[in-house]
Amino acid sequence: MYPEIVIKKGTNLYTINEIQSGTEQLKKEIEWLKMALNCNVEQTDKVFPEPPMSLKQILICWLEEKERLLSKCELAVKHAVNTLRIIEIDC
């Protein structure tokens, strides 16, 4: 829909359509992580009783990171569409 509007991440340039496609993938990954957290992950932790972090803690960290990235991408797209110029994002 907005192929001419570009978002810059580091030295890479992405069209808004590419970022929007990536946000859809992030949403799927976030849903998967939420489903995984609803499972009984404590049983898996018994197999590895003393890792630096439990499986549940690792899933929570991944989920939080994915949600932060999704938020940044969505804000960058919204800002790029509103201003019609190149936007730099830090993700």
Image (spheres, rainbow, N blue to C red):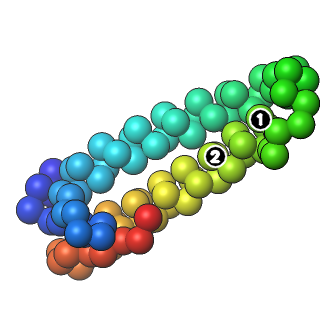
Circle number at residue 55:
1
At a point 67% along the width and 35% down the height, the residue shown is: 34
Q: Residue furthest left?
A: 4
Q: Position of residue 74 (x, y in %)?
A: 41, 60
- Residue found 40% across the figure and 38% down from its top: 25
Label 2: which residue? 63
Is residue 36 among what the camera can see? yes
| In the depicted structure, whether residue 54 falls above or below residue 69 | above
Q: Secondary structure at mark 2?
A: helix
Where's residue 21, x and y in %? 30, 43
Quarter assignment of residue 42: top right
- Residue at 63% across / 46% down in the picture? 63
**Amino acid type, mark 1:** Leu
Residue type at numbered disc 2: Leu
Let me know if residue 80 appears in the view.
no
Q: Is residue 43 left or right of residue 88?
A: right
